Amino acid sequence: MRQTLARRILIALSVVIAVAVTLGLARLTAHASSPSTAVSTKASQSKWRVVTACDQRKTVLVEGYPDNQPLPPTKARQVASLLTDLMQYCNEEVNARIASDEHIFLSVNGSAFVQYVPGRALPLLLVNGGKQFTQRDQAIWKAELTRMVDEGNKLFHSSKLGTNGISCDMCHPNAANTHPETYPKFQTQLKKVALLRDMINWCIENPLEGKTLADDDPQMKALEAYILSQRAGKTIEPGKH
Amino acid sequence: MIKDPFGRRERKAERERKAFYDSLLNADRRTFLKLSGQAAALAVAGSAIAPHSFQLVELLKAAENETEPQVSFRFAYISDTHMFDKGMTHRFVKAALKAVQDVNALDPQPDFILFGGDLAQLGQPGELNLGKEILSELKAPVRMMVGEHDWFFDMGEKWQELFGKPTYSFDHQGAHFITLQSVHEKDFWTARKMTPMERMQTVAGLDNAVQSRFEVGEEQRKWLADDLAKVSKDTPIVVFSHSPLYKYYRNWNFWTDDAEQVQELLFPFKKVTVIHGHTHQLLTNHIRNIAFHGMLSTAWPWPYAPTGLPTITIQMDRADPFDQFDGCGDGAVEVRKDGEVNKNYNFWSRNPFKVSYEMVASGTPAKPGPSY
């Protein structure tokens, strides 16, 4: 046990020395590479070099190499290989960073830097399992949204929510005067704070003389979807009116 | 005079009434005697039965007429009842009955009553029969106009059987009256293989893009030109049209597609007034020599359209949905001896509002209201 402890202390000491030496060397190197004349520009002092691809959307930042000197051939080949990998992703804007310790980090479309192992998939949108959303995905979302809004549109223009032939659109063409953007608000006539669905139910029960819908009724959701879609772009002003 | 805390233009009549009472206090003996008869009537009305603001305005007008150029005659209007055939307790039927009671209570009675169209909701024979039955309770003679809700189920067959031709003219007290069928639409139903009911429901919806736009049509414009050829240019002309005879908001068919061509026929006359239904709101417009007035519905008020509202319209406040009658009502039109026309809006749940010919002529742009 004691031997082991002594050995550990030795190792720790040697690590401290190694770090001290490295730092000292780094300082020396910094001194050595610092400009001897006052005219040299700030750029020439930087300790990295930026390589930009021809599409202007991919850049590689190589740490530890001043930008006023050509890259050594091995480094240049690494950068070229990385850029070739990145060029597959035409539409994305990628900033790569090759750290001094040879680790590669990528920032895709301005997101945070994440580590990248060459040959593996690009860490595009992490929420989507690294895959891009396709046009098909987007078409599905749009169709689903339209389906719900259309369902609401039909209900809004139908007298089946009520019993007396009256429908919502008779007083509210294009959902005018529904002001969904003003809820929640204290509805003075109800003497309580109301949400849009409370007023929808009030209208179903009174002018339409129908049965109120449950808050989570798909018909209620569709009505809300239609009304809100008709009023898109209006500033949200809770409590107004 | 009290300061109106809400600054509603609709409260003008209330302020005028207050001024009238105040004037009684300050009147000399002679004026007092002249006004006291009316004051007594007001007092009785105020204590015995709920005062009918509409009648108060009429009395006020009578007092004003002592000095102003006289009103030649008045006619009342009821419009856009949109009745379903679902029994006498249906809310729209109750509203129509209320209007009939209202107009029958007018003293003096109007020379005639204009019915402004959309008697029925879906053009059903039952709805039109019920409508005729209810309107038959009116004491003064009724002049009928047709609306799209009466027309597009059977293309006007039943309506014409009950009420005759939808296009006609007549003279009354020196004014020439013309009633148009301004809700013709180009055929959108045959190609879509619609049933009569589908056609009717399509036209009944305001915010659908399927239907065509309203038009007077070439045949009727020709009739109008012939009719007007017989009238001197000094004669006051009053046109009844269900749709506004100008272009307000296309998406909701607050619109007449050939409005310019109809207006062209009316421009040569000295004084023209168009009274229209369909828009269910206080609505005023002025194009050259033509004044346009909308009528209130008895059934429900429409919101103002998001664009195209004539600038001289003083918008009514948004209706209270919790009050069935708010924003609804009937009204009357005063035709003066000089051919000028004042338009009274008799709001059921608000104070009455009068759009005088001076207001229309001054053409002062009104401030945007709170409606939309």
Image (tube, coloured by chain):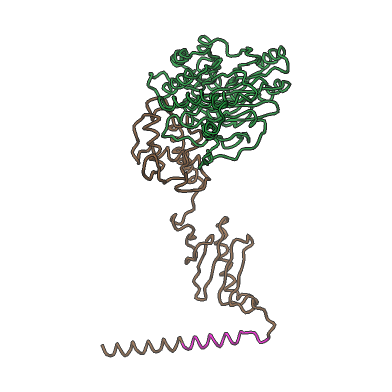
Chain colours: A brown, B green
Relative horizontal placement of residue A153, taking residue A209 as reference (left or right) = right
Q: Nearer the viewer, residue A89 or A31?
A: A31
- x, y percent for residue B122: 47, 20
The residue furthest left is A1
- x, y percent for residue B171: 64, 12
Q: Main secondary structure of the magenta part?
A: helix
Choose top left, top right, bottom left or bottom right for residue A42: bottom right
The residue furthest front is B29
Image point (70%, 21%), residue name: B266
Image point (38%, 31%), residue name: A206
Whether residue B372 is visible here, answered yes or no, is no
In the rendered view, would you say B358 is above or below B221? below
Give the magenta range. Answer: A20-37
Q: Nearer the viewer, residue B171 or A16?
A: B171
Relative horizontal placement of residue B243, taking residue B227 as reference (left or right) = left
Choose top left, top right, bottom left or bottom right for residue B232: top right
Q: Is residue A27 magenta?
A: yes
Image point (51%, 21%), residue name: B78
Q: Is residue A34 magenta?
A: yes
- x, y percent for residue B200: 50, 21
